Every structure is written in C-alpha cells, then in structure tokens.
Amino acid sequence: MLEAMLDGLMLVLAWPAAGYMCAGVLFGLFMGFTPGVGGPVTLALALPFVYDLDGVSAVAFLLGAHSVVVTGGSVSAILFGVPGAGPNAATLLDGYPLAQKGEAGRAIGAALASSAMGGLLGAVVLACLIPVLRPIVLVFGPPEFLMLSVLGVLFLATLSGKDPAKGMLAGLLGLMISLIGEELLMGTKRYSFGQMYLWEGIHLVPAVIGLFALAEMVDLVVRGGSIAKPNQAAPQSGPWTGVLDVFRHWGLFLRSSILGVVIGIIPGLGGDVACFLAYGQAAQTRRKGEVEYGQGNIGGVIAPEAANNAKEGGALVPTIAFGIPGSGSMAILMGALLIVGITPGAELLDEKLNITFAMVWTLVLANVFGAGLMMLMAKRLARITLLDGALLAPMVIVVCFIGAYMTSGSMGDIIVAIVIGILGYAMKRLDYSRAALLLGLVLGRLVEQNLFLSLRIFGGGFVFRPITMGLIVLCTAVLVWSFLKPWLLKRNPEPA
C-alpha cells in the first residue's frame, strides 16, 4: 500500500500529468466561476480533450478540473449572490450578506480555506478506505454489480426533485437510450434505423454536452441579460481573517466535512444535498451571541464549502470500488476512465492501485493549488460574471460543437448533441432530473451486461445470493420510501 501510495504521487508529479492537472485546475476554476455551469458541464466540456492522453494524465486533468469547480463558484456567490454551481447555493445565504457588510474578503478567505481543507480531508478518508474496500470488492460478482447498478439509478432518480415519479421516468429514459446500438449477446442491431453511426450506441461525450452544456446555454439566451447583476460593489478586505475563522470554528468545519464525505459515498445524493445539510446542522448548533444565520454568519460560509469539497473524496469511493457513480459528475468521470482504458472495480484496487492513489493525490494537490490561486485572482476573475449572456453563450456553444465532433469525427455526434440538447432544455424547464437520465445512460450497458452474465453463470437463482438479496431489499426500500415520503408530508405538513 505504501509503495502504491508513493508511486501514485510520483505519477501525478511527473510530466506531463502535472501540467495537465494544473491546466485542469485553471479550467475548473474558470468554469466554476461562471454562474450556472457546475461540475457536470465542466467535465462534459473537458472530456473530449482526454482521448489521446494516457490514463494518469487524463485522470489528473479531469479530477483537477472537477475538484475545484465549487471552489471557483463560491466567489461569485459571495460577491454577487449568484452561485457558480448548484452546491454554492447555500454559501450565498450568508456569503452575500457578508459582502454587503464590506466583509467580502473575509468570506472569500473562509470559503477558500474550508474548501481546500475539506478536499484534503475527503482525500484522506478515501485513502484510508482503500485497504478496507479491496477484500469487499473481491466478494462481489455480476449479480451484486447488477443490483448495485440498479440501486445507483434508483438513488439518483428518487432523490432528485420533489416528484419521485419524474426522477424515475428520467432514469428509465436514460436506460432506454443506452439500449440503442448492437446488443451484447447476439449482436442484434437495436433502434439503429439503418444508420451505421448508431451501431455503437449513443456516445457519452456528445450526449453529456447536449444534456448539460447546450441546454444551459440555450436557457441563458432565452432568459437574456447579463449572468450576474450585483447590487453594489463588494470591497475586498481581510481574506486571511476568513482563513483564521476556519480554525476558530474547527468543530463546525470537521462536522461539515465528515457529513460531506458520508453523503458523497451514498450514490445519488450529491453536492446540493451535502451543502444544505451542512448548512442546516451549522444553523442548529449556532452559539449564543452569534449573528443569525442568513444575516452574515461566517459559519454559513464555512459549513457548506467544507462539505462541498469533502464529498468529492466520498463520491469516488463507490465509483472506484464498484463502478457505481456517486453523482452525475462521477458518471461522466467513470465514462472517461473507461475511454482511457481504466475499468473501475477490482482492477483499480489491485493491479492498478497506484492509479487509484494518483486520484487521491490529484484531489489533494488540486484543492491546494486551486484555493491558493483563487486567493490571488478572485478580484479580477469577478469581472467575468458581468459578461452579457449574449456574448458568453455563442463562445460556449462553439466549444460544445467542437468537443462533440472530436468524439469520432462524425456529424452524427453533433446531431446527437443537438437532439439531446433540446431534450435537456425541455427537462430543465419541466423540472425533470437530467442527472438521473445521464446515470441511466451510463449504467444501462452495465445493467445489461451483468444481467446476461448473472443468468449464464447462476441462472435465475442469482437473486438468492445473500448480498444480492440484501441489495434487492434495499432497492425496494428506496422505491417505497421515495413515494411514501411526499404522502407523509401532505398528511403532516407542519414539521416539513
């Protein structure tokens, strides 16, 4: 383990992986700072550039970009009350009032310090869990991976949005789209409509670009106006005071980080849940004499930002160990790993353990580098949010089309991106979970493959394997609770 850990560090620090990690951090900070973009869109735009990279460089670039998206988004949330990404929504509740009080520098310092240290804690937890995960993964076979895949879709489908039926429909739609192309067992062509392009199925990159990036840009153009409209200039002062605030509230930081790691491990919960749960527990543990939460309490910045970055280490646990993405962003990352020839599961915990530790070191180094860079550049980068949407959207859309075309050099990729982009925009307007659809698309082939293997190896009796039965019970419980919860809230709305 120690040898693999040191080897992983050397892989990340070696050229060109170190250069790609730095480039990924810069790209992630920029995209995170642009309101409304978020982690999935950032990874979708970065994904086409890893096709010709080796495995370590690809991981360094993608994880470097993804791990700092929320860090960049916290600055625009504090300065203008406009969250750069969904998980930054809780940060603005107290960050923006602090900026209105002339303490923007303090709030930014606290956000960056808690983000960096939260990311470090999440990476440490991931490294500590690797020895425990290795023997567990070896026990799992195709039936267990089948039910884990189904559970991953159910978690994200049922925990996304207020209407669980919409989440379920989105997840099932993703599974249906994944069936396009050549069938695994007999080689039958399904839903290809005589087009050779569709024989290989829907490629992940153009699908993700359309579902997130194009849909968001279309929405920005439709809404019109600038993406950020600050009410007043927020003076920059005292960032190091905010850094010291994190150490003064060490207990709050530690509780929020641990909560973020736990939520990250559970597939489907994601950053939005982590930040608001951390913010809620911070508000409930407010000390007497402190400023009310929502009125400019520095704890309202520390708690969600610590949880946001700590969850990334937790989200990598099911992704690496079982091939079950913990979030929509992890689904894209898993697709990227498969593209560069890295298969999640036992392989990453055995033969390629050094690459797993390379991921851990990338999280550590990217968080430190990104936070330090933002401390130096926050004031100048703030001007990006004043760009009019009519100027920003065309540039991003051009990059989207270039990225989609680079997938296979076919016009079919651009057509897929446009069609799924229209679908993504409609889902956004109708409040359907695009993350659930994406996870269904990514896991669909895994579900089909493990179902065939389970039936061929064990027959129909695979459902009676102990771990498989436990996962079936858990899937049933998730389904029942997701539909029972809204009914209970309607009967007793007061506590809700």
Image (cartoon, rainbow, N blue to C red):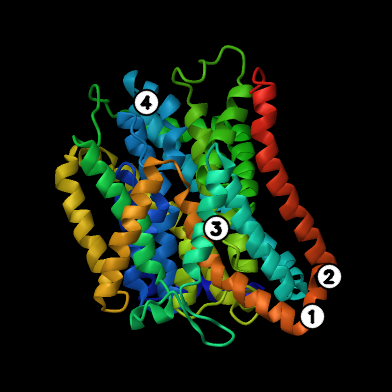
The residue indicated by pointer 1 is 458
Residue 345 found in image quarter: bottom right
Q: Residue tagged by mark 4?
A: 96
Q: Amino acid at mark 4?
A: Tyr
The numbered mark at residue 5 is none
Measured Cα–Cα span from mark 4 to mark 1: 58 Å
Q: Look at discs 3 and 1 and give the one toward the viewer.
A: 3
Give coordinates of residue 395: x percent, y percent. 18, 55
Find residue 333 and report its horizontal and vertical position in percent.
47, 64
In the drawing, does residue 228 fall left or right of residue 281?
A: left
For disc 3, the marked residue is 172
Q: Amino acid at mark 3?
A: Leu
Mark closer to the observer (2, 1): 1
Pinpoint residue 352: horizontal percent, then vertical percent. Answer: 58, 79
**Farthest top residue?**
289
CA separation, marks 4 and 2? 53 Å
Q: Which residue is mark 2?
A: 465
Pick whichever of labels 2 and 1 is earlier in the sequence.
1
Type of the residue with mark 1 = Phe
Question: Marks 2/3: CA distance?
Answer: 26 Å
Lower sequence index among marks 2 and 3: 3
Rendered position, 343 above or below 299: below
